[in-house]
Image: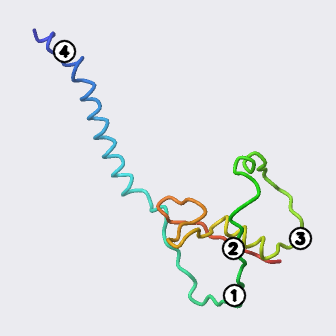
Amino acid sequence: MFNKIMKQFLLNKFPIFILIIIVLFTIIFVDSACNILPKVYEEKEKPENAEVEEIIYLPEPETVGEMSLEETIKKRRSVRSFDDKELNLEQISQILWAAQGITDEKGHRSVPSAGALYPLEVYVVKK
C-alpha cells in the first residue's frame, strides 16, 4: 500500500515539488546576487572647475531621410579608415542627434537605455 501511495505521489506531486524548490533557490540566488554584486551604474562626479569657453549652437538634425530603414540596414557597413576632412556643423549635429538626441518634450532619446539611465557620454574632439 505504501509503495502504491509513494508511486502516486511521485507521478502527480513530485514535478510541482521540484518546481517549488527551483523557484525558492532562484529567489534566494537573485536576492543574494543583488546584494553582493556592485552597482552597475553610479553617477560620476562632475569636475567643479569646468569652464565653458564657447557655446556652439548646432543646426536642427534631419529627422526624415531619403532611404527606407530596410535599405539602410542592407547597405550598412563598418568603416575603419577615415578621411582627414573636417565635418561641418550639420554633420556633427546629425551624428550627435543619432547617438544621444532628444526626440520629444518628455526627454525620450534616439537610442534605448535600460532603466533610462543613458550611461553613454558623447564628445566631439577637434584636432
Q: Could you say whether the residue bearing mark 1 is in a helix, strand or loop?
A: loop
User: Mark 3 Cα within 10 Å, few/some/many (few <14, many 20+)?
Assistant: few
Of the residues under marks 3 and 4, which one precedes in the sequence? 4
Left or right of 62 in this view: 127: right
Residue that label 4 marks? 8
Q: Give coordinates of residue 40: x percent, y percent.
A: 48, 61
Q: Are marks 1 and 4 in contact (CB under 8 Å)?
A: no
The mark closer to the camera, 2 or 3, is 3
Compared with 5, 90 (above or below) is below
User: Mark 1 Cα within 10 Å, few/some/many (few <14, many 20+)?
Assistant: few
Determine the residue positioned at 35% across, 46% down. 29
Q: Give coordinates of residue 68: x percent, y percent.
A: 72, 51
Distance (Cα) linking label 4 and label 2: 67 Å
Determine the residue positioned at 69% across, 73% down. 123
Type of amino acid at the residue the image marks with label 3:
Lys
Type of amino acid at the residue the image marks with label 4:
Gln
Distance (Cα) linking label 3 and label 1: 23 Å
Residue that label 2 marks? 123
Q: Nearer the viewer, residue 18 or 64?
A: 64
User: Mark 4 Cα within 10 Å, few/some/many (few <14, many 20+)?
Assistant: few
Of the residues under marks 4 and 2, which one precedes in the sequence? 4
Type of amino acid at the residue the image marks with label 2:
Tyr
Quadrant of res 118: bottom right
Residue that label 3 marks? 85
Determine the residue positioned at 60% across, 90% down. 49
Q: Can you name the residue that lies furthest to the right here?
A: 84
Residue that label 1 marks? 55
The mark closer to the camera, 1 or 4, is 1
